[in-house]
Amino acid sequence: MTAALRSREAILALVVTVMLGLVALRAPGYLAFSNVTNLLSNWGFLLILVLGQLGVLLTRGIDLSQASILAFSGMFLALLSQVAPDLPSGAFVVLAMAMGIGLGLVNAGLIVFAGLPPIIATLGTMTVIRGLIFVLSDGAWISSHEMSAPFKAFPAGAALGIPNVFLVALAATFFVWILLTQRRIGRDIYAYGGNPEAARNAGVSGRRVEFLVYGLSGALAGLCGYLWAGRYAIAYTQSAEGREFAIIAACVIGGASITGGRGTVAGVVLGALFIAILETALPFLRINPFLQLALTGAVILLAVAANARAEWLPGRQILPREDRT
């Protein structure tokens, strides 16, 4: 019981609860139903992306292209909805994930076959994809009246008052939890991130792991792109630009290690909630927009610094990334 109370997840859950309570005391309307649904949507979008980033971080990698994949998926499918207005929502979901997987595998290929460091590979694809969005749209925005009704129906919908975006995030959470904790590939991911050399000696395929985690990250980013464009009824080149910091921060706050091999689904779920509350509470409290950026950045930096301090455990050896096999 004592160990459970001292776990990162328990401490973070307590911090989130206290933060939510303080905001509610200062602004009781924050917990109004309409605002709670907005919080759930924001949490859902961030959580979908965070779950993809978790797998990458576990392998000592990083994916800076998620927000760009999101924007590309949203723009491409919004344009497709104009050409094929009768295409059902389910088809958009499948296409979004397929595009995301394809772009994620490009990242993996650059890392595995070209030998590029993950930060360089994904920084490059992030820039290329943003450029492709501009070429695809000719710099134009796609607004609500230009999108088909089926395209917007599912992302903007809700079940029993709960936004569909959040329900998708819950389904993604369950899937990733099963993958990482109940399947052999999940153990391989943790082993490879914790000690690549030992994992390879034990028969773990580094290439398989890399392609899986980057493909999953891309798939979730692509899915999020469709949901984003459909719910907000807008698609443009700068969609989700700058969200990379919030995604990685949520993972680190939730206990995912940037040196690989450590991190839990429960932890990053709470990390994403922490960021979502922080981002939605500050505007609700009518804090100066410029001060909001400073406060958000300061709180995130403090949380990340605290996590980094905890990273330096006695006897923990950080091995270099070796050639993949």
Image (cartoon, rainbow, N blue to C red):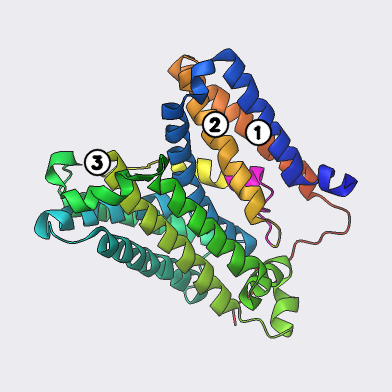
Where does residue 252 sit, x and y in percent of width and height?
64, 46
Query: Where on the picture, by quarter, is residue 23?
Result: top right
Percent of width and height locating residue 296: 55, 28
Residue count near mark 2 (Cα–Cα under 10 Å), binned few <14, some 14–19, many ≥20: some
Q: Is residue 5 visible?
A: yes
- N-term-proximal mark, 2 vs 1: 1
Check residue 241 in the rendering and tell me which mark sits there, or answer none.
Answer: none
Give the spatial CA distance, label 3 vs label 1: 30 Å
In the rendered image, the vertical position of residue 70 relative to residue 299, given as above or below: below
Label 3: state its secondary structure.
loop
Which mark is drawn over residue 233?
3
- Residue 202 drawn above or below residue 312: below
Numbered disc 2: secondary structure: helix
**What kind of element bears circle 1?**
helix
Q: Which residue is mark 2?
A: 277
Q: Which mark is residue 16?
A: 1
**Of residues 37 and 262, which is closer to you in this image?**
37
* Mark 3 vs 2: CB contact within 8 A: no
Q: Are marks 2 and 1 in contact (CB under 8 Å)?
A: yes
Is residue 130 visible in this depiction of the protein? no
Q: Amino acid at mark 2?
A: Ile
Q: Quadrant of the C terminus?
A: bottom right
The quadrant in which residue 194 appears is bottom right
Which residue is located at x 42 percent, y 70 percent?
Answer: 105
The amino acid sitting under disc 1 is Val
Residue 178, quarter of picture: bottom right
Question: What residue appears at the point 55 percent right and 29 percent down from the top-left corner?
Answer: 278
Q: Residue at x 49, y 58 (%)?
A: 171
Q: Between disc 3 and disc 1, whose residue precedes? A: 1
